[in-house]
Amino acid sequence: MPTPRQRRVVRRHAALTLVALPVFAVAGVLTPDTAVVAALLSLLVAVVVDAPVHVRPTWRARLRWVLLLGVVLFLGLAARHSYAVLRALSDALVYT
Protein backbone atom coordinates (compact mmCIF):
# COMPACT_ATOMS: atom_id res chain seq x y z
CA MET A 1 0.00 0.00 0.00
CA PRO A 2 1.45 3.39 -0.97
CA THR A 3 2.44 5.80 1.74
CA PRO A 4 1.18 9.40 1.80
CA ARG A 5 4.60 10.59 0.64
CA GLN A 6 4.49 8.25 -2.36
CA ARG A 7 1.01 9.45 -3.25
CA ARG A 8 2.19 13.05 -2.99
CA VAL A 9 5.09 12.40 -5.39
CA VAL A 10 2.78 10.73 -7.91
CA ARG A 11 0.24 13.56 -7.67
CA ARG A 12 2.92 16.23 -8.13
CA HIS A 13 4.42 14.36 -11.07
CA ALA A 14 1.03 14.01 -12.75
CA ALA A 15 0.16 17.65 -12.10
CA LEU A 16 3.45 18.97 -13.47
CA THR A 17 3.22 16.76 -16.54
CA LEU A 18 -0.40 17.70 -17.18
CA VAL A 19 0.53 21.38 -16.98
CA ALA A 20 3.60 21.07 -19.22
CA LEU A 21 1.99 19.12 -22.06
CA PRO A 22 -0.80 21.62 -22.87
CA VAL A 23 1.71 24.48 -22.62
CA PHE A 24 3.89 22.76 -25.20
CA ALA A 25 0.83 22.03 -27.36
CA VAL A 26 -0.26 25.67 -27.31
CA ALA A 27 3.28 26.77 -28.13
CA GLY A 28 3.29 24.33 -31.07
CA VAL A 29 6.35 22.39 -29.93
CA LEU A 30 4.71 19.23 -28.59
CA THR A 31 6.52 16.20 -29.98
CA PRO A 32 7.24 12.80 -28.46
CA ASP A 33 10.71 14.10 -27.53
CA THR A 34 9.37 17.08 -25.62
CA ALA A 35 6.69 14.95 -23.96
CA VAL A 36 9.32 12.51 -22.66
CA VAL A 37 11.54 15.36 -21.48
CA ALA A 38 8.60 17.08 -19.77
CA ALA A 39 7.57 13.88 -17.99
CA LEU A 40 11.14 13.10 -16.95
CA LEU A 41 11.80 16.61 -15.66
CA SER A 42 8.48 16.73 -13.83
CA LEU A 43 9.35 13.45 -12.10
CA LEU A 44 12.76 14.80 -11.11
CA VAL A 45 11.23 18.02 -9.77
CA ALA A 46 8.54 16.12 -7.85
CA VAL A 47 11.15 13.84 -6.26
CA VAL A 48 13.50 16.69 -5.35
CA VAL A 49 10.73 18.87 -3.91
CA ASP A 50 9.39 16.02 -1.80
CA ALA A 51 12.80 14.72 -0.66
CA PRO A 52 13.18 14.45 3.10
CA VAL A 53 16.21 16.19 4.54
CA HIS A 54 17.60 13.62 6.97
CA VAL A 55 16.25 10.26 5.80
CA ARG A 56 16.10 8.44 2.47
CA PRO A 57 13.01 6.25 2.16
CA THR A 58 13.60 2.80 0.74
CA TRP A 59 11.05 3.26 -2.05
CA ARG A 60 13.18 6.02 -3.59
CA ALA A 61 15.69 3.40 -4.75
CA ARG A 62 13.03 2.07 -7.13
CA LEU A 63 12.77 5.49 -8.78
CA ARG A 64 16.29 5.00 -10.11
CA TRP A 65 14.96 2.42 -12.58
CA VAL A 66 12.10 4.63 -13.73
CA LEU A 67 14.47 7.54 -14.27
CA LEU A 68 16.95 5.29 -16.07
CA LEU A 69 14.20 4.06 -18.37
CA GLY A 70 13.20 7.66 -19.09
CA VAL A 71 16.77 8.65 -19.92
CA VAL A 72 17.17 5.63 -22.22
CA LEU A 73 13.91 6.48 -23.97
CA PHE A 74 14.99 10.09 -24.37
CA LEU A 75 18.38 9.05 -25.78
CA GLY A 76 16.62 6.75 -28.24
CA LEU A 77 14.34 9.54 -29.41
CA ALA A 78 17.26 11.95 -29.65
CA ALA A 79 19.27 9.43 -31.69
CA ARG A 80 16.33 8.90 -34.04
CA HIS A 81 15.94 12.66 -34.48
CA SER A 82 19.68 13.12 -35.04
CA TYR A 83 19.67 10.36 -37.64
CA ALA A 84 16.80 12.03 -39.49
CA VAL A 85 18.59 15.37 -39.47
CA LEU A 86 21.87 13.85 -40.67
CA ARG A 87 20.04 11.97 -43.40
CA ALA A 88 18.34 15.17 -44.56
CA LEU A 89 21.69 16.96 -44.56
CA SER A 90 23.37 14.22 -46.55
CA ASP A 91 20.52 14.26 -49.08
CA ALA A 92 20.87 18.03 -49.39
CA LEU A 93 24.63 17.80 -49.89
CA VAL A 94 24.33 15.17 -52.63
CA TYR A 95 22.36 17.46 -54.93
CA THR A 96 24.62 20.48 -54.57
Image: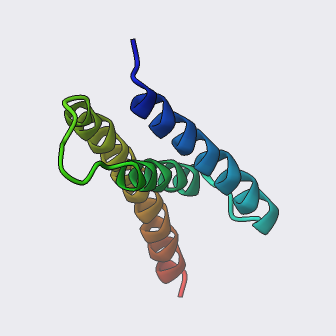
Residue at the far bottom in the pictured view: 96
| Image x and y of residue 28, in percent | 76, 65
Total count of labels: 0
Question: Residue at image x 56%, y 36%?
Answer: 11
Q: Is the residue 60 above or below the residue 25 in the image?
A: above
> Which is nearer the eye, 96 or 46?
46
Q: Residue at x 75, y 53 (%)?
A: 22
In-front residue for pair 94/54: 54
Q: Decide which of 15, 69 is in the foreground and name it.
A: 15
The one nearer the camera, 11 or 79, is: 11
Q: Quadrant of residue 18?
A: top right
Judged left or right of residue 60, residue 96 is: right
Among all residues in the image, which is located at the extreme right? 26
What's the coloring here?
rainbow
Give the position of the N terminus as an image quadrant.
Answer: top left
Task: Give the percent coordinates (x, y) of residue 36.
Answer: 50, 49
Height in image: 56 above or below 35? above
Counting from the top left corner in percent of width and height, residue 19 is at: 69, 53
Residue ID at (24%, 30%):
62
Q: Residue at x 54, y 81 (%)?
A: 95
66 sits to left or right of 55: right
Using residue 22 as the reference point, say whether residue 66 is left or right of it: left
From this viewpoint, which residue is outermost toward the top? 1
Q: Is residue 94 above or below residue 31?
A: below
